[in-house]
Amino acid sequence: ESTHAIWSLFGHFWLDCVDFQPAYRPIHTVVADQIWICCVTVWVGLTGGIGSGKSAAADLFVQLGICVIDADAISRQLTAYQGVALPAIQAAFGEQAVFEQQLNRDYVRDLIFKRPEAKAELEAILHPLILKTILQQQAAVDAVYGLVDIPLLTELPQFRDLVQRVLVIDAPETLQVDRVMARNGLSRAQIASIMAQQATREERLAIADEVILNDGDLHHLELQVLKCHKHYLQTFGTV
């Protein structure tokens, strides 16, 4: 899970990206030899703290054939090689902000450290671009439900306008720390610093419609994702 995403997302439920009118369209999905009919795709916000297993859960939903829109990946694409956000970033922060046609992350990171207000300036550039991309991707999906993987869903409530439900991948904090230490080699102090900048476990659970407690191995998580998947099909689909 990324801990350095700098962006916000704003949107509207069930809106068509072209004319922003309610987009109701019949959708047929065959599941276990049954036809499920849904008027629109229901979007579920997927979130969780560092080391919770959110990314692993997202991968499992993808394996089940569910569309997962990764907001963090969109943010990275906008500032990658020849990314569409680069001209505006270079105009705002100078030529050094872009190196070899991609974001000079070290330069921008140092700039934000020295001048914290630069973070808001960067967000002002990225916000509308991320929003446009997510809405475009949502409009292209015909399914009973889909996921939008939003790392900062709890920290920035306006993200919730993109989704109708919230799924939190939860884990005990001690287990989160152990996983990140094993995965990234960070010290406990470094991980504690990262977690202190994120929403608390209680804050995430407070916004959840569904919770997957990921306190076991990958197989245990897989079973819970499958159960949640079936629940969504039954809840959002009509036989």
Image (tube, rainbow, N blue to C red):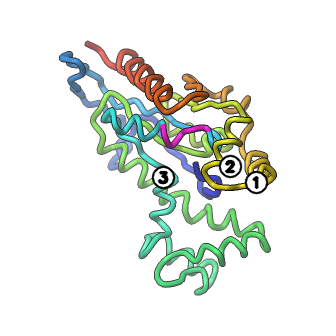
Residue 187 badge: 1
Which is nearer the N-term, disc 2 or disc 1? 2
Q: Give the residue number, with chain letter if any, for mark 2.
A: 181
Evaluate if marks 3 and 2 touch, with contact meaning CB atoms under 8 Å apart.
no
Residue 67 is drawn in which quadrant? top left
Evaluate if marks 1 and 3 touch, with contact meaning CB atoms under 8 Å apart.
no
Of badges 1 and 3, the one in the foreground is 1
What amino acid type is highlighted by mark number 2? Met
Q: CA distance from mark 1 to mark 3?
A: 35 Å
Residue 131 badge: 3
What amino acid type is highlighted by mark number 3? Leu
Q: The magenta stretch spans which residues?
A: 52-56
What amino acid type is highlighted by mark number 1? Ser
| Along the line of sight, the residue nearer the viewer: 6 or 191 | 191
Label 1 packing within 10 angstroms: few (<14), some (14-19), many (20+)? some
Is 74 part of what is drawn in magenta? Answer: no
Q: CA distance from mark 2 to mark 1?
A: 6 Å
- Eyeballing the image, is 107 above or below 214? below
Evaluate if marks 2 and 1 touch, with contact meaning CB atoms under 8 Å apart.
yes
> Where residue 157 sits: x, y (%)?
64, 39
| Along the line of sight, the residue nearer the viewer: 50 or 25 | 50
Q: Secondary structure at mark 1?
A: loop
Residue occupying the point 53% across, 38% down: 161
> Where residue 76 sits: x, y (%)?
50, 62
Label 2 packing within 10 angstroms: few (<14), some (14-19), many (20+)? some
Q: Mainly helix, strand or loop, the magenta region?
A: helix
Residue occupying the point 57% across, 24% down: 211
Q: Is residue 227 left or right of residue 110?
A: left
